[in-house]
Amino acid sequence: MQLSALGGSEGLEHNATLNRESVVALGAFGAITAGAVYLGARGTREAVSQRWYKRLKKPSFQPPAAVFGPVWSTLYALIAVSGWRIWGSPAGAKRSQALGLWFVQLGLNSAWSHLFFRKRAVRAAAVENWALLGSIVAYTAAASRVDRKAPWLMAPYLGWVSFANVLSTDIAWRNA
C-alpha cells in the first residue's frame, strides 16, 4: 500500500501500515523536532543552575525542575507525530498551511528558551510565549482540517503551554 505522503490517495487514517518511506518520514519529523529542542535548550541547563535564575522570584505553583524533562520529552514526541501525520495526509493547500504552522510553532517553542535562559529577557519571553500559544492554536485548527488525530496529539502541548504562559507571565510580572 502506498501512503498519501508519497503521492497516493490514501491517508494515514486509512492506511496504518508503516512502510519504509513512512518510517523515514517519522524519523525526519523526530529529527527536526530534536533539532529545534537542541537549539532552544543550548545553555538552559547551565542557566537553571546559575545564580540569576535561582534569584528570580517565582510563584509557588511552579513545578519542580525534575518535572520539566519528562513532560517536554513526551510533548516533543507528540509534536513530531502530529507533524508526521499531517505530512502523510493528501497533498493540498490545507496540508501545506498546517505544515507551515507546524514549523512556526516549533520555531517559537525553540525561541522561548533562548530568550528566557540565554538572553535573560524574561518579559520578552513572556510575550513570545503568548505568540507560541497562538501558533499552537492556529496549527491545531489547521491540522483538524487535514487529519482527525493530529490535532488531538497537540492537546497536552496546548494545555502545558497555557500553563507555561501563566507561569512565564507571573515570573515576568514579579521580576519587572
Image (cartoon, grey):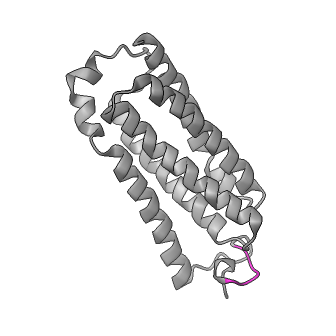
Instruction: Give the image quarter of residue 54.
Output: top left
In the rendered view, does 105 fall on the left or right side of 119? right
Q: Position of residue 155 (x, y in %)?
A: 63, 44
- The residue shown at (31%, 35%) is 118
Q: Residue furthest bottom?
A: 1
In the rendered view, does 168 fall on the left or right side of 50? right
Residue 159 can be seen in this image: no
Q: Please state the total of marks drawn on the protein image.
A: 0
Q: Position of residue 82 (x, y in %)?
A: 60, 58
Residue 154 can be seen in this image: yes
Main SS of the magenta segment?
Answer: loop
Q: Position of residue 171 (x, y in %)?
A: 44, 18
Q: Position of residue 34 (x, y in %)?
A: 40, 57
Q: Which residues are magenta?
A: 7-11
- The residue shown at (26%, 32%) is 47
Instruction: Give the image quarter of residue 81.
Output: bottom right
In the rendered view, does 34 fall on the left or right side of 107? left
134 part of magenta stretch: no
Instruction: Give the image quarter of residue 102.
Output: bottom right
